[in-house]
Image (tube, grey):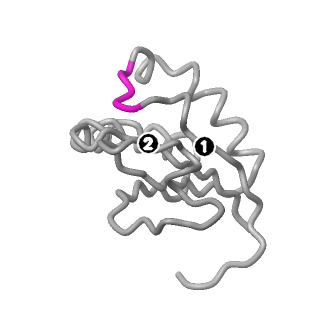
């Protein structure tokens, strides 16, 4: 089964196109290093929770939008090897991040169940 890296990112709403362009530049590099699928989803219906929610997780500000993102890898070993290569890749060095990376939530997940195509 696959391995998934998941992300929650607080992006200034005004930076939507810059964020999309950054993701489009990075996606082929991720694929080159073994990624099977990459999704960047712009939040448009983020529910308020009673105890916690996506907004609270990233300490969302009024002028920001939550991005929910994931990259599917064949396995954890491929993901781990790719992370090292990505961090050293000159094509991504100096890339301006159009968001506050300190509030980004990141996690790796082993697939428990998969269905669909």
Q: Earlier in the sequence, mark 1 or mark 2?
A: 2
Q: Does the stretch in magenta take in 98?
A: yes
Looking at the rendering, in which quadrant would you find the N terminus?
bottom right
Q: Is residue 97 above or below residue 59?
A: above
- Residue 94 got which mark? none
Label 1 belongs to which residue? Answer: 105
* Neighbour tally class for label 1: few under 14, some 14-19, many 20 plus, Cα within 10 Å: some
Q: Residue at x 52, y 42 (%)?
A: 59
Q: Which residues are magenta?
A: 95-99
Q: Looking at the image, how many numbered discs can be counted on the residues?
A: 2
Q: Secondary structure at mark 1?
A: strand
Percent of width and height locating residue 41: 39, 59
* Neighbour tally class for label 2: few under 14, some 14-19, many 20 plus, Cα within 10 Å: many
Q: Is residue 100 above or below residue 34?
A: above
Percent of width and height locating residue 8: 53, 49
Q: Main secondary structure of the magenta part?
A: loop
> In this view, which residue lies farthest toward the bottom?
116
Measure how far apart labels 1 and 2 are at the Cα level.
9 Å
Label 2 belongs to which residue? Answer: 10
């Amino acid at each position: 089964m696959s391995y998934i890296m998941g992300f929650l990112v607080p992006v200034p709403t005004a930076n939507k196109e810059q964020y999309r362009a950054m993701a489009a530049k990075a996606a082929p590099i991720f694929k080159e290093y073994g990624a099977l699928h990459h999704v960047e989803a712009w939040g448009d219906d983020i529910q308020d929770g009673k105890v916690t929610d996506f907004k609270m997780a990233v300490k969302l500000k009024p002028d920001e939008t939550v991005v929910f993102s994931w990259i599917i890898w064949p396995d954890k070993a491929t993901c781990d090897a790719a992370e090292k290569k990505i961090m050293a890749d000159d094509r991504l060095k100096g890339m301006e991040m159009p968001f506050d990376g300190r509030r980004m939530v990141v996690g790796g997940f082993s697939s428990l169940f998969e269905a669909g195509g």
